[in-house]
Amino acid sequence: MKLQPLADRVLIRPIAAEEVTASGIIIPDSAKEKPLKGTVLAAGTGTKDEEMVVKEGDVVLYGKYAGTEVDLGAGDKVLIMRQNEILAIVK
Amino acid sequence: MKLQPLADRVLIRPIAAEEVTASGIIIPDSAKEKPLKGTVLAAGTGTKDEEMVVKEGDVVLYGKYAGTEVDLGAGDKVLIMRQNEILAIVK
Amino acid sequence: MKLQPLADRVLIRPIAAEEVTASGIIIPDSAKEKPLKGTVLAAGTGTKDEEMVVKEGDVVLYGKYAGTEVDLGAGDKVLIMRQNEILAIVK
Amino acid sequence: MKLQPLADRVLIRPIAAEEVTASGIIIPDSAKEKPLKGTVLAAGTGTKDEEMVVKEGDVVLYGKYAGTEVDLGAGDKVLIMRQNEILAIVK
Amino acid sequence: MKLQPLADRVLIRPIAAEEVTASGIIIPDSAKEKPLKGTVLAAGTGTKDEEMVVKEGDVVLYGKYAGTEVDLGAGDKVLIMRQNEILAIVK
Amino acid sequence: MKLQPLADRVLIRPIAAEEVTASGIIIPDSAKEKPLKGTVLAAGTGTKDEEMVVKEGDVVLYGKYAGTEVDLGAGDKVLIMRQNEILAIVK
Amino acid sequence: MKLQPLADRVLIRPIAAEEVTASGIIIPDSAKEKPLKGTVLAAGTGTKDEEMVVKEGDVVLYGKYAGTEVDLGAGDKVLIMRQNEILAIVK
């Protein structure tokens, strides 16, 4: 299933965070409230109010509760969110 | 009954999700919060603020609680939602 | 009493729904949450933000809680609602 | 006291509803939630967003809770409301 | 202390209402919910969205809870409110 | 520490109110809900929607809860607020 | 990890406040509700509604709850906030 996000939406594949540190300690929940990283798979065409800035291949930061999860099949889960929910591009 | 959606509304026929897996296990409710798929039957003419992008025949993803159900008769249920509630076009 | 709806309002005469099925079973309340049908009696002249699309004679679908009831006299009840509350035109 | 409503406001003298029917039965409260009738005494000059449509002498329908009551003296009570709260002009 | 109201604000000196009637009966609180009268002392220069209509010397009606009280000194209390809170000019 | 307020913000040094009257009576809290006075130390450059009207040196009135307190050092406390929160210029 | 903030967002490195005074007294929580200081690391390109004013190197004041914390790695925590949340530039 290939998806074309509508308007100012962006399709993002989350990059798994390393939740277990080198010493093997699991970071508690409260420490995970910081933004998450993902790779842009596809971007919408924008709207009158929101020109698209991110593009396919960009690695971006987004808030923990941003977007809606979509299962592309076989448990391959991606996110659809509005560009407005993206905090920054990781260079 | 044939319907012409008003303004930025879209008429969608839901595509039944395969809720029973190959092994016959019924997916529990929480797993069904992901978006649903449907086929666009008709699109409005848009508004000053919302140009129509989806068109008849498009398969689209939308949120579980998007739209209003309309019975076309004989239990043939479709949805009317705003284009803004559509997350992506499935290609 | 003849009414000229103001701005983007529309005057609608509800079409009685067939709430008793062929087999004489009364549809329970939850099943009645779907949209209702009505005939447009008169439409306003629109506003800067809302051009009028529906016109006298159109049969339209609207949500169960749309509009305000007006008694034209002798129990002849019609609805005044904003065009924005109309979901679709029935063709 | 003569009043010039400001902006998109309208001064309305309510028309007493016939709350006692021919048969002398008092209509219960729930039946009175429908719109009320009044005569326009004066209209504001409008705003950038709201052009005035109603004018002195128009009989209009408005919601039960629309407007603010003003006592012109000697118990002569009128209403000041925004034109936007007027549902329709009675012709 | 002389005040120049900012933007679309208006400085108003309330006109004391005759709360005791000819027969000496004090009007109860509920009856005082109607608008109050005041004299415009000064008006702001307006904003892009709100052109000033009232001017010094106008007697205006405003809602009971409109504005903020300012003590000009010696208990001389006036009100600062937005023009938008003024209901009508008394002619 | 010298501050340049951003956009439509204004830096204000509060003018201590005389809370003890001539007779030495302390005004109770409820009587202090009226606006406070301050001197403008610096004004932002404005925004597309808000042109700056107040300027350095103006004495202004503002609501009791307007703005955010900033300590310039050594307990020298000033306020940063939006121009929109200023009620009037004291002349 | 180098970050390019999106739209009207700004990347800020907080400047540690001296929470222990000369006499060694720890300032209680309530006293810390005043704005915090930080250095701008990077600014977005702005939006149609918000032109960027702050730039790399500016020292700025922002509210205690402004922005989202991002860990650049090795516990190097910075903030991403909208320019609108910045109160003033420290000169």
Image: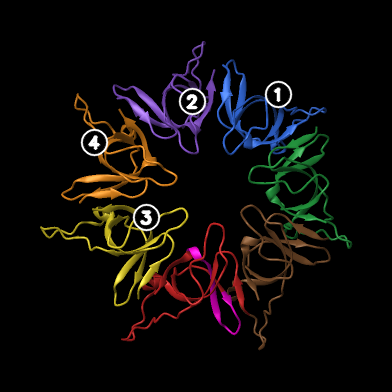
Chain colours: A orange, B yellow, C red, D brown, E green, F blue, G purple
Residue most extreme to the left: B23
Tell me: G19 left or right of E83. Answer: left
Work out whether disc 1 and disc 3 sit on a shared chain. no
At x 42% / y 43%, what residue is drawn? A50
Which of the chains bears the disc numbered 1? Answer: F
User: x%, y% of residue A6?
Assistant: 33, 50
Res. B85 mark: 3
Q: Amino acid at mark 1?
A: Gly
The total of numbered circles placed on residues is: 4
Quarter of the picture containing the C terminus of chain E is bottom right
Categorize mark 3 by other alpha carbons within 10 Å: few (<14), some (14-19), many (20+). Answer: some
Res. C30 mark: none
Query: Can residue B83 be seen in this snapshot?
Result: yes
Between A35 and G23, the one nearer to me in the picture: A35
Give how far apart the Cα atoms at labels 2 and 3 are: 36 Å
Tell me: A83 left or right of E9. Answer: left
Residue range highlighted in magenta: C70-84
Q: Looking at the image, do the residues carrying marks 2 and 4 touch, with CB atoms under 8 Å apart? A: no
